[in-house]
Amino acid sequence: MTLSPFWPARLSRRVAAPCTSLYYNLEVSAKRYPDKTAIEYYGAAISYARLRREADALAGFLQRRCNVARGDRVVLYMQNSPQFIAAYYAILRADAVVVPVNPMSLASELAHIVGDCGAHVMILADELYEHAAPLCGDLLQHVVIARYADYLGDPAGLPLPTVLSEPPHCPVEHATTAYQMKGCDLVRWAHVLEMSEPPSDHHSTSADLAIIPYSSGTTAAPKGCMHTHRSAMHVIAASIQWCQLSQDAVVLCTAPLFHVTGMQQCMNTAVLAGATMVVMTRWDPRCAAMLIERHRVSVWIAIATMMVDFMSQPDLGEFDLRSLKCLAGGGAAMPEALAQRIQSQLGLPYMEGYGLSETISATHINPPDRCKRQCLGIPIQDTESLVIDPHTLEPVETGTPGEIVTCGPQVFEGYWERPDATRDAFIEIAGRRYLRTGDLGYVDEDGYFFMIDRMKRIVNVSGYKVSPAEVETSLFEHPAIQEACVIAVRDPRRGESVKACVVLRPNCFASEQEIIEWARTRMAAYKVPQSVEFVDSLPRTGSGKVQWRVLQEREFARSDATAPCTPCRPGAE
């Protein structure tokens, strides 16, 4: 292992993470700072006392009306909002396990996760009801439905997402108390708070399961990553020290909170520190600039795609952005030219980091005072990473490419009910258990890690990981498609986009646009192929397996041949 000589001087290489539940962080902050604003939401200010009170009321409802018991899984299906944060901590307060779902997921994707984790309760946003409705009475017995607009304050000129002005989508909004559908109880969020059911004593320990985020991985079916309160707490405590986050910090929450980056680096760190969260439901670069100026935002975790939008605003210089002290992110490598513009215009570096759903966010972060561009960073506190030969599984020399493996308190327990996949995810080296990331990279003489490729089949769309096998499985359902192979295509804004190489059935016809529109009805938007190439056949090995890498390398060779002299190179989370 190469220890970086550029470890931040103010930091110990170890961190004493609290040995408590994540909910306890909210309890403590609400006691310390009851009247302090926990959430700013388009002109509305929600105090820590109110946030805890609402989380407790929802927890009591889950326990007493939905029969949620310790260790039960509860699905959280919602965009960034005050209700997401309250629901997240309510589930933990009920000693249950949060299963966050991408709000871009459609019915079939949602059904897989609900069925796989065995949840019978879901908390969702009104505009997503149509995707959950087919599950009511079958997989789901209880559904709590929230409307973001209920928490809207006086936006005072802020551009608002359209979802805040749309009429209700769910019939429960027209019921006085609750609504039944196929034996499933649907209840309004406001009614739950009115009932104010007291929760039972909180029993979760640091060893209990807390969160199961689903990772696309390399298979057609996403897998649940089991995280305890302890594994999540380690990243939170380490990140607070790394970014010097205090109770006076103001954190802009633009990164999706369902995703481990937004969940950990924006929401959970802020709650532990007692900081203020400025929450945006939908990304809007102008709104972000206005909020930074209005609320004196000091910390912003933003993926590269957001920074492209943000820095492209022609009048950005008219906003007072001097309050920003920490600007960080991951998901895709930051283009060199953009990083230089950020440094020049905002006066601070973009601090890149690296992590996985399997590590509940960060394993590596760049030192704040010595960031290297397009670099994963160095291992954070209590974390050890190596680069190994993927064939011999032996560590390689500094500067030699290989697979990145990592070991630390934040590494997950394994995949939910997938013992074989869990076994394959780990390797033992010198008596220590390392997670195989599936990412190819190297470590330089300064101890910084760089990624150069990936072993696993993943398309990285603005930090969202897309499993080609999952998209292929859906495409095979199209009546005109005989075979399909999904690869990545370089995208100057999103890093990568999805491309499908398709073989049509004999005597069948489908246009590129028809297939794309068909796919939009069956999968989340970021998974939908942005282009379709029709081919007579797919390259195969002697054993008949599709040689996806041949198609991938051919595609990248095409883009390299037509790229400008200083191309934007996409990276990985």
Image: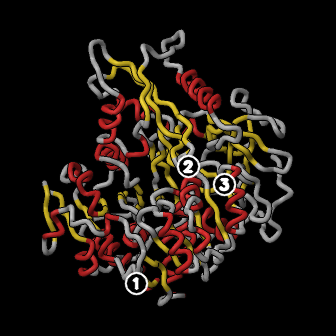
In x, y percent, where is residue 79?
A: 39, 62
Direction bottom: furthest residue: 35
Q: Which element carries disc 2, helix, strand or loop?
A: helix
Q: Are marks 1 and 3 in contact (CB under 8 Å)?
A: no
Where is mark 2, residue-wise? 358
Position of 450 with respect to 471 (left or right) is right
Tell me the number on the disc at residue 338: 3
The relative height of residue 240 versus residue 275 in the rendered view (above or below) is above
Q: In the rendered image, is residue 109 in sight?
A: yes
**Residue at 60% across, 66% down:** 236
How packed is label 3: few (under 14 Cα within 10 Å), some, or many (20 or more)?
Answer: some
Q: Is residue 40 above or below residue 179?
A: below
Question: Given the image, on which type of amino acid does mark 3 rest?
Answer: Leu
Q: Nearer the viewer, mark 2 or mark 1?
A: 1
Residue 95: in sight, yes or no?
A: no
Q: Position of residue 187 (x, y in %)?
A: 21, 68
Mark 2: which amino acid? Answer: Glu
Label 1 sits on a secondary structure element that is helix
The spot of residue 25 in percent (x, y) is 53, 75
